[in-house]
Image (cartoon, coloured by chain):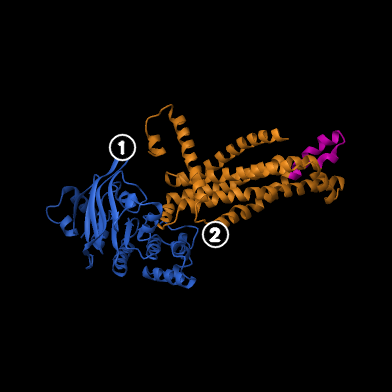
Chain colours: A blue, B orange
Amino acid sequence: MHKPESHIDKTKRVISIRDLHKSFGDNHVLQGINLDIYQGENIVVLGRSGTGKSVLIKIIAGLLKPDTGTVQVLGKNVAALSYRELEQLRLKIGFSFQSSALYDSMTVRENLEFPLLRNSRHLSRAQVTSAVEKALSAVGLAATINQYPAELSGGQRKRIGIARTLIMQPAIMLYDEPTAGLDPITSDEINSLINDVQKQYNTSSIIITHDLTCAKATGDRIAVLLDGRFIQTGSFDEVFGSGVDTRIKSFYDYNFIT
Amino acid sequence: MSAKQKKARSAVISRSLDNFFYSVYDMGQFIVRFFIEAFKPPYEMRELVRQCYMVGYKSLPLITLTGFITGLVFTKQSRPSLAEFGATSWLPSLVSIAVIRALAPLVTALIAAGKVGSNIGAELGSMKVTEQIDAMEVSATNPFKFLVVTRVLATSFMIPILMLYMAFVSLMGAYVNIHANEMTSLASFFENAFSSIKFLDFFSSLIKSVIFGFTIGIIGCYQGYNTTQGTQGVGKAANTSVVTAMFLIFIEEVIIVQITSWFR
């Protein structure tokens, strides 16, 4: 499955990362990352487990602070923002967690209402309900509205997690391993959902994965992360085409992509 | 440099002693952050009320049972000693002093440490390892304010109320035993019981309960909020919350009793 045509505006940079370094003790996870993401673009960050892919998007969302380097999101330097400013910026960023991170003690409705009620207090009850139903319809799970996360399958939880981010109508989506632990059919549904979200909400996205099928289906551009640096960026065919780096080829061979 | 990074470095005194001091330092920072966030608007009133309900109302059956049995058994066990001197009429005042000064605050706090403290540690620990706390943060909600401040305030408010309730139930347990043996009326029992109780007794017990409640809440939240090592860490957080809170409650009890005795 190839990524459908998308409308990338190369004049609008939504995320700009320059010379980003991050270490945990003696473990130098990111060692000079440079990357630009444009309006409407889906970029896939590909790499083996433990290469710092999730650390990268946590820095973008302001959950971790970089050691050196800058991350500009929608024109703002994330590390330099006050807590209030960061909260305002986060409203424009949707973060889909690997574990879905749904609140166990709340129903699907309450999970979706949570960010809305807290950040859009002017909305009426009817408007909140309408927004919840719209977000659930966008992920095709309107029937689960009164269920608890424990009653949902892994794929459903991922979708609800995405719906919870969509409710704030973000400009940027960050997906952390969206297909991890899912069967191929459900993974395919999630890949389609990522593309649908990009089309419907005109988002720019970073998709963290080690699943080449997901990368091929969702990415306008692929960035391969190895030893703390991007060793190659380009379209799927450019990255995995002829003359491919042996380190990338082994990754490709292992995924048995057709 | 975070405490965890400091821990990873070579030991200054010994690894276990270093870890102890780093934990104390971390805990100190956590408490300071609690006071800063607690006074800074916006306030999470709805969540605070929900937590008060969870801590207070949900603990009532256990508090009722243990309180009643404590009063009943304490009276029954004290009776023979007083009977030797023909002083069973002193039972109501003896029991009330014991219950209000020591038993009610201590037993309530120990029960709450077991029930509420472990619950907070496990709940926040589970939220931490499943990235729910991060999810809250990226939803532009301050998780410390929403999860920690509300829980610590709820335990600090509700433990004193539960303590007063337990004191009442314990005295009722004592009354059942006294009434069965001496046919004392309820009015006479309470008149005798409260004749020896001073304002300082109530006040010191209330202050003690607020401190116990704060201890239970802050320890549970600290352990849960700093959980690592996945599901194994959740169990450890719940367990450590109970053990540490109980240990600190006993130390605080000794200190407060000593301070109160200076005012008597």
Element on which disc 1 rests: loop
Vertical placement of A228 versus B260: above or below?
below
Q: Is residue B148 visible?
A: no
Q: Label 1 belongs to which residue?
A: A26
Residue B92 — which label?
none
Q: Label 2 belongs to which residue?
A: B46
Q: Main secondary structure of the magenta part?
A: helix
The three-letter amino acid code for the residue at tag 1 is: Asp
Residue A113 image position (x, y, % from top left): 46, 64
Marks 1 and 2, how far apart in space? 44 Å
Give me the residue at 25% from left, 52% from top.
Answer: A17
Vertical placement of A36 versus A29: above or below?
below
Q: Is residue A204 visible?
A: yes
Q: Is residue B185 magenta?
A: no
Position of B131 with respect to B250 (left or right) is left
Residue A134 image position (x, y, % from top left): 40, 71
Residue at the limit of the structure toward the left, as seen here: A243
Give me the residue at 45% from left, 35% from top.
Answer: B22
Q: Is residue B87 magenta?
A: yes
Q: Badges 1 and 2: C-beta atoms under 8 Å apart?
A: no
Residue A191 image position (x, y, % from top left): 30, 63
